[in-house]
Image (cartoon, helix red, strand yellow):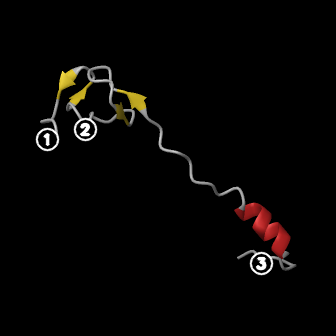
Amino acid sequence: MAVPKRKKSRSNTRARRAQWKAAPVALVACPQCRAPRRPHVACPNCGTYNRRQVIEPSA
């Protein structure tokens, strides 16, 4: 197994870790009820997906 010849400095380690960011959740408007929902997922508000009713709407 490959082993590093030199220890990585703290600044290099922190610079590499600085790129690990949490991306915001992508949301699109539901074509049926205009509520925000995640893409490629049935709308939790009205229960439609691809303009068809697939689940019972939540309360």
Percent from the top left, x then y, of residue 18? 72, 60
Q: Residue at x 86, y 78 (%)?
A: 5
In the image, residue 29 sits, relative to residue 19, either above or below, namely: above
Residue 36 appears left or right of 59: right
Among the two numbered marks 3 and 1 on one chain, the one whose residue lies closer to the N terminus: 3
How far is disc 3 from disc 1 in space, using C-alphas? 57 Å
The secondary structure type at the circle numbered 1 is loop
- Which of these two is toward me, 49 or 25? 25
> Which quarter of the figure is the C terminus placed in?
top left
How far is disc 3 from disc 2 in space, using C-alphas? 50 Å
Query: Picture quarter containing residue 50?
Result: top left
Q: Say which mark, if any, is on residue 59.
A: 1
The amino acid beneath tag 2 is Pro
Q: Are marks 3 and 2 in contact (CB under 8 Å)?
A: no
Label 3: few (<14), some (14–19) or many (≥20) C-alpha neighbours in 10 Å = few
Q: Residue at x 77, y 68 (%)?
A: 14
In the image, residue 23 sits, relative to residue 14, either above or below, namely: above
Percent from the top left, x then y, of residue 7? 84, 79
The secondary structure type at the circle numbered 3 is loop
Q: Say which mark, if any, is on residue 44.
A: 2
Residue with the mark numbered 3: 3
> Which quarter of the figure is the N terminus placed in?
bottom right
Q: Say which mark, if any, is on residue 16.
A: none
* Residue mark closest to the camera, 1 vs 2: 1
- Which of these two is toward me, 6 or 17? 17
Label 1: few (<14), some (14–19) or many (≥20) C-alpha neighbours in 10 Å = few
